[in-house]
């Protein structure tokens, strides 16, 4: 059960790394597909990068085993990663 | 509710990525982006297969690779290894496939489908009013169960 947690964390980390682009006003749309023998974990993310390159916002939608549909926003600044979920 | 995590990650290369071999494969176009297609790791390793597609046609790739330095460990280690070998570009596609028999073997593909200019106001980069910080792990099953039982707090 903990496995999907690691998958999702890895995916978010990779996407977040990609989001750290000092390019003004750029939007990146990313798709992620992770799977193990037990489960599939598709997700889609839209990444917005600020015009000043000071931060980024990652909006991720996923349908997780055990949890159902999850919308998550990750806000990124230079040294702190804010993860917000609801 | 939301949680705050530091993105400072140790520089250790626990997977030996900094010395892994890189093989150039045929160039490919992925979702409209002309890409350099590379295999990471030994050719004879048929269990752990890792490939990456890099494109210089995506704006901001140099800044991306520079700013990502020190963040999230392995991805940056990979980028630094590629740079050392003379390969640069935005990661349009990344594929890691563990073909072992382990039930925990993970395969993952991340792909850039679109990139375009847009307006990103500073308000999009701030936590919305009304949300409170929690120390809970947002990826934790217990955390979400507790949230469901107690209602969806902001």
Image: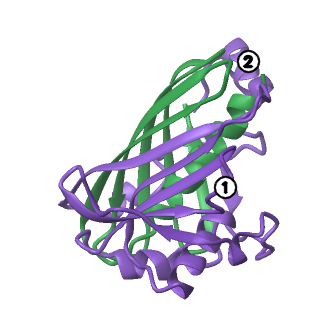
Chain colours: A green, B purple
Quadrant of the drawing holding the N terminus of chain B = top right
Residue appearing at x 66%, y 62% in the figure? B42
Disc 1 is attached to a residue of which chain? B
Left or right of A52? Residue A57 is right
The disc label shown at residue A6, or none: none
Residue B11 location, quadrant:
bottom right
Location of residue B15 in the rendering, given as x and y in whole percent from the top left corner: 78, 63
* Label pair 2/1, CB-CB below 8 angstroms: no
Circle 1: is it few (<14), some (14-19), or many (20+) Cα within 10 Å? few
Q: Secondary structure at mark 2?
A: helix
Name the residue carrying label 1. B44
Q: Is residue B88 visible?
A: yes
Residue appearing at x 68%, y 53% in the figure? B45
Q: Earlier in the sequence, mark 2 or mark 1?
A: 1
Q: Is residue A1 above or below residue A72?
A: above
Q: Is residue A1 above or below residue A3?
A: above
Location of residue A70 in the rendering, given as x and y in whole percent from the top left corner: 51, 26
**Mark 2 or mark 1: which is in front?**
1
Name the residue carrying label 2. B145
Quadrant of the drawing holding the C terminus of chain B = top right
As rendered, which of B41 and B119 lies closer to the eye? B41
Q: Secondary structure at mark 1?
A: loop
As rendered, which of B105 and A67 lies closer to the eye? B105
Q: How many marks?
A: 2
Disc 2 is attached to a residue of which chain? B
Outermost front residue: B44
Residue appearing at x 80%, y 29% in the figure? B102
Residue appearing at x 70%, y 77% in the figure? B18
Q: Is residue B141 above or below residue A58?
A: above
As rendered, which of B34 and B24 lies closer to the eye? B24
């Amino acid at each position: 059960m903990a496995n999907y947690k690691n998958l999702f964390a890895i995916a978010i980390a990779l996407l977040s790394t990609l989001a750290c682009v000092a390019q003004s006003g750029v939007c990146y749309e990313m798709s992620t597909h992770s799977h193990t023998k037990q489960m599939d974990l598709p997700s889609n993310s839209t990444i917005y990068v600020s015009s000043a390159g000071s931060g980024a916002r990652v909006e991720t939608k996923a349908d997780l085993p055990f949890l159902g549909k999850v919308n998550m926003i990750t806000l990124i600044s230079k040294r702190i990663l804010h993860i917000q979920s609801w | 509710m939301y949680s705050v995590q530091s993105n400072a990650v140790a520089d250790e290369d626990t997977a030996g990525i900094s010395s892994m071999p890189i093989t150039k494969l045929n160039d490919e176009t992925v979702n409209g982006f002309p890409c350099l297609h590379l295999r990471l790791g030994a050719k004879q390793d048929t269990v752990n297969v890792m490939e990456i597609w890099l494109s210089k046609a995506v704006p901001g790739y140099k800044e991306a690779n520079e700013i990502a330095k020190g963040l999230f460990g392995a991805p940056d280690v990979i980028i630094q290894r590629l740079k050392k070998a003379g390969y640069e570009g935005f990661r349009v596609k990344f594929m890691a496939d563990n073909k072992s028999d382990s039930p925990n073997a993970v395969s993952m593909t991340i792909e850039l489908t679109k990139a375009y200019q847009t307006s990103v106001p500073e308000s999009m980069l701030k936590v919305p009013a009304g949300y409170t910080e929690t120390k809970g792990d947002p990826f934790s099953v217990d955390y979400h169960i507790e949230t469901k039982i107690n209602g969806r707090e902001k």
